[in-house]
Image (cartoon, rainbow, N blue to C red):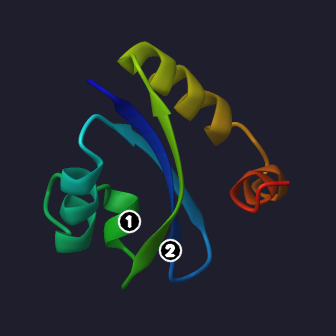
C-alpha cells in the first residue's frame, strides 16, 4: 500500500498539506466539503492539487507531512516549483 503527502493550493493562494493512503478519495472528500474534509479547506470555494509525494509506510508519510508543515511558505513554493 502506498501513502501520499499532498499539497493543495486554495483559491486564496494558501497552502494545505495532508497525507492519506487513498488520494482520489481524499480529494473527493475535500471537494464535497463533507465532515471528513479538512475544516480549513472547506472554508475556501475551490482548491487545486499542486504537489504529491509517495511513501511506502504511513510513518514516513506522517513524518514528511510534519516536516513540510514546519517549512516557510517560500520553501514550500520552491518545492512545488521544483527548485
The image shows residue 21 at horizontal and vertical percentages of: 27, 34
Quadrant in the picture for the C terminus: bottom right
The image shows residue 53 at horizontal and vertical percentages of: 53, 40
Quadrant in the picture for the N terminus: top left
Q: Nearer the viewer, residue 64 or 42?
A: 64
* Relative height, residue 23 to residue 30 (above, below): above
* Relative height, residue 40 to residue 32 (above, below): above
* Quarter location, residue 12: bottom right
Q: Nearer the viewer, residue 16 or 49?
A: 49
Say whether disc 2 or disc 1 marks the residue closer to the N-terminus. Answer: 2
**Which residue bears the numbered disc 1?**
41
**Which residue bears the numbered disc 2?**
10
The image shows residue 7 at horizontal and vertical percentages of: 52, 55
Query: Callout 1: few (<14), some (14-19), or many (20+) C-alpha neighbours within 10 Å?
Result: many
Measuring 23% from the left and 42% from the top, which residue is drawn there?
Answer: 22
Measuring 48% from the left and 48% from the top, which residue is drawn there?
Answer: 6
CA gap, disc 2 and disc 1: 7 Å
Measuring 14% from the left and 63% from the top, which residue is drawn there?
Answer: 34
Residue 43 relative to residue 61: left or right: left
Q: Nearer the viewer, residue 83 or 33?
A: 83
Query: Callout 2: few (<14), some (14-19), or many (20+) C-alpha neighbours within 10 Å?
Result: many
Q: Nearer the viewer, residue 68 or 49?
A: 49
The image shows residue 24 at horizontal and vertical percentages of: 24, 55
Measuring 41% from the left and 19% from the top, which residue is drawn there?
Answer: 56
- Cβ–Cβ under 8 Å for marks 2 and 1: yes
Q: Secondary structure at mark 2?
A: strand
Amino acid at each position: 500500500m502506498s501513502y501520499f503527502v499532498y499539497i493543495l493550493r486554495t483559491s486564496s493562494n494558501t497552502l494545505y498539506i495532508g497525507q492519506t493512503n487513498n488520494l482520489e478519495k481524499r480529494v473527493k472528500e475535500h471537494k464535497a466539503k463533507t465532515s471528513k474534509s479538512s475544516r480549513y479547506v472547506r472554508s475556501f470555494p475551490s482548491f487545486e492539487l499542486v504537489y504529491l509525494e509517495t511513501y511506502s509506510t504511513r510513518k514516513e508519510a506522517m513524518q514528511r507531512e510534519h516536516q513540510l508543515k514546519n517549512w516557510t511558505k517560500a520553501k514550500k513554493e520552491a518545492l512545488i516549483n521544483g527548485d
